[in-house]
Amino acid sequence: MSDPYLEPEQQVTPLELFFDLVFAFGFTQVTTVFSDDPTWSGLGHGLLILGALWWAWAAYAWLTNTVDPGEGAVWGAILVAMAAMFVAALAVPDAFSRHGVVFGIAFLIVNVMWLTLYALGAHGDRDLLGAILRSAPWALAGAALIIAAGFVHGGLRPLLWLAALIVGLFGPLLVRISGWRVQPAHFVERHGLIVIIAIGESLVAIGLGARATRLGPGVIVAAVLGLVVATSFWLAYFDFFPIRAEQLLAERRGAQRTALARDVYTYLHLPMVVGIVLFAFAMKTTLAHVGDQLDTIPAVGLCGGPALYLFAYVALRFRVSRTLGRGRLVAAVACALLLPVALVVPALLTLTLVTAVWVALHAYEIIWWREARARTRQRLPASAS
């Protein structure tokens, strides 16, 4: 058998990008859940749904990193999975009410197709097949719990959803990690694209929020500030992180590479995406009420979304280097501390303060990380403070 670490890497295919558009729609549907029920309960429901969507997307990111989606049978099966995921996304606004079973069944089909495709792609690779079989019970049990949640009511339903995410998304942590394959360049590019899609959702939210109100000076200023924050999400990620992450993955082999890919991407990219989607929801509300104080949940989205996004980088850095750094940790704390302020000042002022934190962070990183960023882009070892 050829060495999988020496084989040429495949590129992200148009089919994968098309597949991701279904999740773009799913993210939009989650912001609808937040907007329709801006309470702690609605926030919890939206986060659980977003966790399930991420679980499904991450599973297929691992799949297409190993299996060529351009092959005939694989191509057709992915389209079937995409159709099932689209049905699940359609059911998102009512996933905790009348369409819970619809979401659950569609989600089970997505998982079954993933396992089937992976098993077929692992033909002749006993180690990979063993890894898939170790993960299969967790994926199927988690999906079954979501179906079960559709048949119950009251407080038991979110508990079953939570149990499903713990089982399906985090259960594989309890089994051996050996056997999986990771192509660094493809894996890094794939996750970068889903971050772009999530950021795009924040731009859509700004547009929808502006359309729902008069385009006065306050709304225009808020829209531009929202664009600055969305740009900050992009800059914080794409300035040099993908380059360095690919280097770190390429330097490792076997279980070490797999564990790093799992932790940095499958798990720590989830709070990044959650933070972006929360901010997108908050922008819709902010644009409609630029002169008013925000209610608690929109304030959590406006301040807590960026904070969560930045805290994910702090956790990522700690996973890689066992250090916390300074800039992004301070900026994350600053965004979080703006939450009580957001409850007593106009929404436009809160957005201005959040934007100011981002601008200060970028100024700090451009100055302090200048040499480290240059070395990273030259693909030489670097260590940023």
Image (spheres, helix red, strand yellow):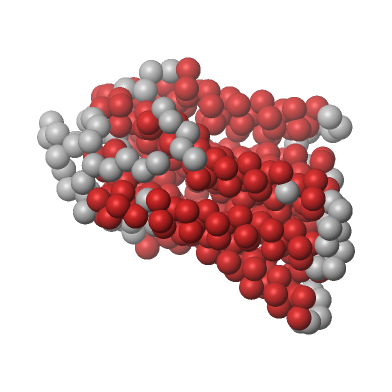
Expressed as whole percent of the image width and height from the top left, the position of residue 152 reads 81, 31
Expressed as whole percent of the image width and height from the top left, the position of residue 187 reads 35, 46
Q: Is residue 115 left or right of residue 185?
A: right
Please tell me in which quadrant of the rendered image residue 250 appears: top left
112, above or below 358, in the image = above
- The residue located at (43%, 31%) in the rendering is 323
The answer to whether residue 116 shows anywhere in this view is no
Q: Quadrant of the N terminus?
A: top left
- The residue located at (27%, 50%) in the rendering is 376
The answer to whether residue 307 shows anywhere in this view is yes
Please tell me in which quadrant of the rendered image residue 263 appears: top left
365, above or below 201, in the image = above
Instruction: Decide which of 197, 116 is in the foreground and name it.
Output: 197
- The residue located at (38%, 18%) in the rendering is 176
Q: Is residue 184 left or right of residue 96?
A: left
Expressed as whole percent of the image width and height from the top left, the position of residue 13 reads 34, 59
- The residue located at (87%, 64%) in the rendering is 292
Instruction: Decide which of 218, 167 is in the foreground and name it.
Output: 218
Expressed as whole percent of the image width and height from the top left, the position of residue 251 reads 23, 36
Q: Quadrant of the C terminus?
A: top left
Q: Is residue 327 left or right of residue 4?
A: right
